[in-house]
Amino acid sequence: MAVQFVLTPALFMAQELAGRLGMTTRQGLLQLVLRRSGRLPALALLATLTASCLGALVSELSGLAGVGEMFGVPVWQTSAVAAAGLLGIVWTGSTRSVELLAIAVGLCELAFVVLAVLAHPSVPDMAAQLLQVPLGDRGYLWLLAANLGTCVMPWAIFYQQSASIDKGLTRTSLAAMRLETLLGAILCQVVTAAVVVAAAAAFHRGAAAGRPLASVGQIADAFTTTIGPAAGRIVFALGLSGGALVAAIVVCLTAAWAFGEVFGQRRSPGESPARAPGFYGAFTVVLAAGAAIVASGMNLVALAVAAGVLNALLLPVVLWFLYRTPRDALPDDVRPRGAYAVAVAIVLALTAGLGLGAGVAGLL
């Protein structure tokens, strides 16, 4: 649980820096790298982003497929329906309204905060376990890398910058963006920590102790020990599917924006497919690839964890460009300066190093 709060500054700094770049320069990160460093570094960054987007999309579609599996729907059918639905959402230009609906459904994740309180965790036990960091355990390091990769996500950094441009935000909104980003980072980590607390109570002290956790349904059943089987499954399904739906939309948009930045194509979902074929083509290819991987029959839980580790392994490349680019692209009055600039450098370097180190150690 302590890891969630330790990662909060890294999450805020990365997202805030991306927003600062987008709102001030009115260019995406790939555009800035292309213009300042050339095509080869831009293509390398594009490959990194594509891998991150594909991994994240697999993770989100795995969540949706897992929810369907809980109610007896085969994985391939859920994957196909989800992919078709997401294509329809974006191709018909109704992305904004569905994003709002998905976010509203995703707020059911706040129920995990209630579950954590109802679990009545032992404060002394929690305090003692804060110091228990089994760095010699490969399994722990694998999960640590996945945790980090689902907190400071490469694709989310790109989305923050590109979305601020697409929404027409300028440097006059910087203060509001910083506050919103800070509150979002704190809320995200509080909910994640609550999931850890609720899970610990269910998996180790409740009726779920000793149960296998090889599927989304088995994980959901473990959470039902606190509020009952019917309510537990509904809350878990709504929270997981709501968050997965909005994240899947965002991931595909990020990939499409990225290709547009590098290859000079129109890149706004507000334009028709006829006027922006490259944008919609990239969106469709990434979505179809993700759905095919999920429908292949691989274990959904292991697949989602591996996607998080992939993000962690890609972080050094993305965070390097994210930190380096503002030095040339931002004016003096907007560029990070003084103690804050030093803090950003240290936090991003430690985050990149931890993600890479834990991921590689988990693989060995």
Image (cartoon, rainbow, N blue to C red):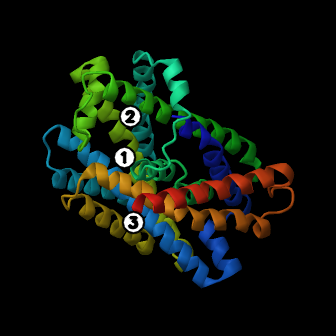
Residue under label 2, please give it. Answer: 105
**Looking at the rendering, in which quadrant would you find the C terminus?**
bottom left
Q: Secondary structure at mark 2?
A: helix
Q: Amino acid at mark 3?
A: Phe
Seen at 68% across and 44% down, the residue is: 177
User: Taking 359 as reference, is 344 left or right?
Assistant: right
Q: Secondary structure at mark 3?
A: helix
Answer yes or no: do the residues labelled 1 and 2 have beta carbons within 8 Å?
A: yes
Mark 3 or mark 2: which comes first in sequence?
Answer: 2
Residue 85 lies, in percent from the top left, at 28, 52
Q: Amino acid at mark 1?
A: Leu
Seen at 86% across and 56% down, the residue is: 333
Residue under label 3, please give it. Answer: 283
User: Taking 133 as reference, is 243 left or right?
Assistant: left
Quadrant of residue 25 within the rendered picture: bottom right
Mark 3 or mark 1: which comes first in sequence?
Answer: 1
* Residue toward you, 84 or 161: 161
Neighbor class of circle 3 (other Cα within 10 Å; few <14, some 14-19, many 20+) is many
User: Taking 11 as reference, is 204 left or right?
Assistant: left
Residue 283 position (above or below residue 18):
below
Q: Amino acid at mark 2?
A: Val
Quick check: can you spot residue 259? no
Residue 144 position (above or below residue 319):
above
Q: Secondary structure at mark 1?
A: helix
Residue 99 lies, in percent from the top left, at 43, 45
Residue 95 position (above or below residue 242):
below
User: Taking 51 as reference, is 172 left or right?
Assistant: right
Quick check: can you spot residue 303? yes
Say the numbered circle drawn on residue 245: 1
